Amino acid sequence: MHGVVRRLGIVSALALALFEFLYVAVLVSGLVALESPGDPISDPFFTIMELLILLIVPAMIIMMIAVHAWAPASRKPYSLAAIVFAAILACLTSAVHFSILVLGREPDLAGWARHLMFEWPSTVYALDILAWDWFFALSVLFAAPVFRGSRLANWIRYLLIASGVLALAGLVGVVVGNMQIRNIGIVGYAGIFPFAALLIALLFWCTPNCGEVEPSR
């Protein structure tokens, strides 16, 4: 079973990092293509970003499952909580972005357009903030204590904590009604988290026996 966990961890973490880096690249390309800074990101960039999010969250859940299977018994409650919060994140954000992709351009739903527009204030934007600035933050902050015992594991813990804290900080933008402040959260889950995923893949790769995180004493 250890070999299965190791392979699952490597593949899912690498896939997660790849999808996140692609998301950032498409986001930057979409922003550069804007005629005015206040305009929303248009297609094809917006649709590609939506599809990438639908790929990111399953990869994150699978990676957290591998981390849970790999964690020492004393830290499995933390990794189990990380899975639960990642699953809630996945359900919320998948529902949001699938709805936008499928229903957002339907002319018969014109009366519901404001609820399906990814602009503040709207229903889908509020739910996505709940998903990423709250449940993502809880997931990575609970995953962080699992990683101890080596320099690589410690760096993973630091990056997970940083990404979670920045995601939580994005909630300040909701409180004050300023979505520019809320973008701090994006730095956490799109800027820092992919590097944590890369290091998690490296940690699984460097660990022949995925039975424990800490080295034997």
Image (cartoon, rainbow, N blue to C red):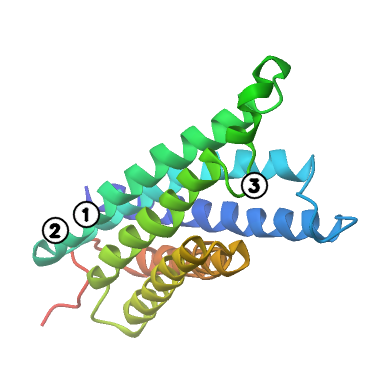
Question: Is residue 214 shown left or right of residue 98?
Answer: left
Give me the disc on residue 81: 1
Is disc 3 surrounded by few (<14), some (14 to 19) or many (20+) residues within 10 Å?
Answer: some
Contact flag, marks 2 and 1 (Cβ < 8 Å): yes
Residue 33 x %, y %? 86, 55
Q: What residue sits right under mark 3 in the picture?
A: 119
Mark 1: amino acid:
Ala
Seen at 14% across and 78% down, the residue is: 216
Which circle's residue, 2 or 3, is located before the other in the chain? 2
Q: Nearer the viewer, mark 1 or mark 3?
A: 3
Q: Nearer the viewer, mark 2 or mark 3?
A: 3
Determine the image quadrant of residue 100.
top right
Determine the image quadrant of residue 22.
bottom right
Question: Is residue 107 shown left or right of residue 198?
Answer: right
Seen at 80% across and 52% down, the residue is: 39
Mark 2: amino acid:
Pro
Give me the disc on residue 77: 2
Residue 140 x %, y %? 34, 63
Which circle's residue, 1 or 3, is located before the other in the chain? 1
Above or below, 160 relative to 152: above
Query: Disc 2 to disc 3, how far (Cα)?
Result: 37 Å
Seen from the viewer's position, the closer of residues 128 and 79 is 128
Above or below, 124 relative to 69: above
Mark 3: amino acid:
Glu
